Image (spheres, grey):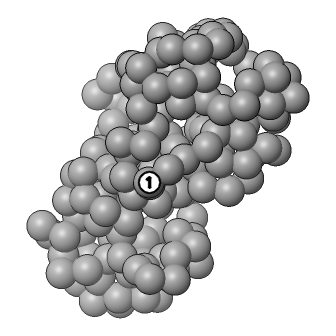
Amino acid sequence: TTSAINRCQIIFYEDRNFHGRSHEISGDCPDVTSYLSSCRSCRVESGCFMVYERSNFMGHQMMVRRGEYPDNQRIMGMSTSDCIRSCRMIPMHKGTFRMRIFERENFVGQKYELMDDCESIQERFHMSDCQSCNVTHGHWLLYEQPNFEGRMLYIRPGEYSNFNNMGLGTVKIGSIRRIMESC
């Protein structure tokens, strides 16, 4: 909704520690570098955002909440790049959460439905891997390792036929968590 978008605000800065030119964003931005030459720190005034190391919401990503992030290298956990290139606002979701996960790409193989968090896909469903999903309700974070650790993928309602197409290379999903917090 429009009111949800107006509540969310993130400010990007060209240099670490909030120095250099800045640019405010209150929604999705596929290319932050169209406004700034680089982005090495950020401040979230309100809301929650996913920030990405590459344009068009690709590559390594991290969720940021209200607060100050003086050095993107620390939040992104990257050694090769510390520049944020795109961001996506995470809207507040109220209501049910539902998604179907599939063992293989293109919605093939074992299929299970999730409505809550899953600390370990392998232990809970005895699946060797999860390579595609269909999200019908809610916003979710998929983690590379069990217990919500490792690299993450943000997904929202829609079909995801192949996680490897999201700019992270080969990804193995170990756990899944609903985004329920009031961002």
- Which corner quadrant of the image does residue 157 belong to? top left
Across and down, in percent, residue 63 comes to: 54, 53
Residue at 42% over, 71% down: 42
User: 32 above or below 41?
Assistant: above
Residue at 82% over, 44% down: 147
In this view, the residue farthest toward the right is 123
- Which corner quadrant of the image does residue 103 belong to? top right
User: 75 above or below 80?
Assistant: above
Residue at 52% over, 83% down: 79
In this view, the residue farthest toward the left is 34
Residue situated in front as seen by the camera: 19 or 110:
110
Left or right? Give the position of 57 relative to 98. left
Res. 128 visible in picture? yes
Secondary structure under tag 1 reads loop
Residue situated in front as seen by the camera: 172 or 180:
172
Residue situated in front as seen by the camera: 148 or 108:
108
Res. 180 visible in picture? no
Exactly how many numbered labels are in the figure? 1
User: 100 above or below 150?
Assistant: above
Across and down, in percent, residue 130 comes to: 61, 29
Other-residue count near label 1 (Cα within 10 Å), few / some / many at <14 / 14–19 / ≥20: few
Q: Where does label 1 land, which residue?
A: 169
Residue at 60% over, 55% down: 151
Q: What residue type is labelled 1?
A: Gly
User: 85 above or below 138?
Assistant: below
Across and down, in percent, residue 84 comes to: 36, 69
The N terminus lies in which quarter of the figure? top left
Across and down, in percent, residue 91 comes to: 44, 32
The C terminus lies in which quarter of the figure? top right
Left or right? Give the position of 147 relative to 82. right
